Amino acid sequence: MSDPNLHVVTGAFGYSGSHIAQQLLDAGARVRTLTGHLDRPHPLQERIEAHRLAFDDPAALTESLRGAKVLYNTYWVRFDHGDATHHRAVDQLEILIRCAAEAGVGRVVHTSITNPSLNSRLPYFRGKAQVEAALKASGVSYAILRPAVFFGGRDVLINNIAYLLRRFPVFGMPGKGDYGVQPIHVEDMATLAVAQGRSTDNVVLDAVGPETYSYRELVRTVARAIGKRRLILRMPNWLVLAAARVVGWFVKDNLLTRDEVDGLRANLLVSADPPTGTTKFSDWLAQHKTELGIRYANEIARHFR
């Protein structure tokens, strides 16, 4: 039997997961998280029951999901790092989905990506499509949400664009920069996820905000907002990636990957569907321009240290 008040969130001590968990708590839900960082300090730590995200122990993972009304999955890897790879993440999420079905979870709300494809040559987008296919075949009620780029809170992409603009006189842009980006505020994403947790219909929704920018426009908009006049140069992919490796060496992070550049340039971070978020990036930027990019958002430090 499912507990009508138990909601399980993977990564509630992380980025988007913490926003989902907070909204669930505000609505009076009992929240449990499955996490690889049981000892990570977090403001929600005292209010959430934490279990290990035990991909290596399906029996324990099934028990940690037993009877939950909804599972909200935010787990994925942005890039391959050590044994954390896209291929392994697909295998792990297939285990999670099987365990959710066996545990009698009533519904899965899953975070994917805009424009995934089983035929994609990009492991990120192909892997996301493989997980979607596994969820659809599981027999569990599902909502698949496909965000493009997040902003707000502790986002990575927008913050780190501002970080680079604050510190370097030149910003390297792959190609013409005419490919699109349609960012969604992380709170809008959480609101959408929680709303879909209340539904029973099987749906696939692009999770995108009301404003679409070309990448060039996005960079220029951020630069103007933080008061930095910068030379934004068109560069070949290899040169942008080489510069990213140099900066990444100093900040001890993987600043940008080849797949991310290829995904951007293939126009995969926009949607043809109506926006599902309501917060305008331009409005948010005007409110948060003074603190944006002051500190670097380090992906490796967040997840692997």
Image (tube, rainbow, N blue to C red):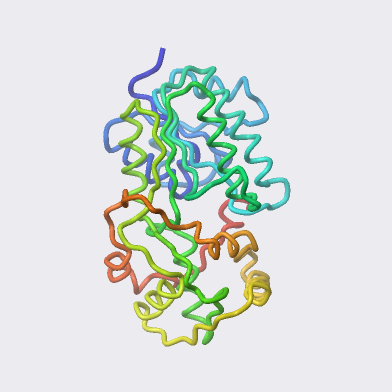
Splitting the image into 4 quarters, where does residue 300 fall?
A: bottom right
Q: Residue, x 41% and y 38% (percent of image)?
A: 204
**Nearest to the observer: residue 212 or residue 301:** 212
Asked whether, in this view, residue 91 is left or right of residue 271, the answer is: right
**Nearest to the observer: residue 294 or residue 187:** 187
Q: Residue, x 45% and y 59% (percent of image)?
A: 155
Quadrant showing the N terminus: top left
Q: Residue, x 45% and y 54% (percent of image)?
A: 148
The x, y position of residue 86, in whole percent, is 65, 46
Farthest residue, direction right:
82
Splitting the image into 4 quarters, where does residue 211 fall?
A: bottom left
Instruction: State the count of labels.
Output: 0
244 in relation to 33, above or below? below
42 in relation to 227, above or below? above
Asked whether, in this view, residue 267 is left or right of residue 194, the answer is: right
Farthest residue, direction top:
1
Asked whether, in this view, residue 60 is left or right of residue 29, the answer is: right
Q: Residue, x 27% and y 34% (percent of image)?
A: 27
The x, y position of residue 203, in whole percent, is 39, 34
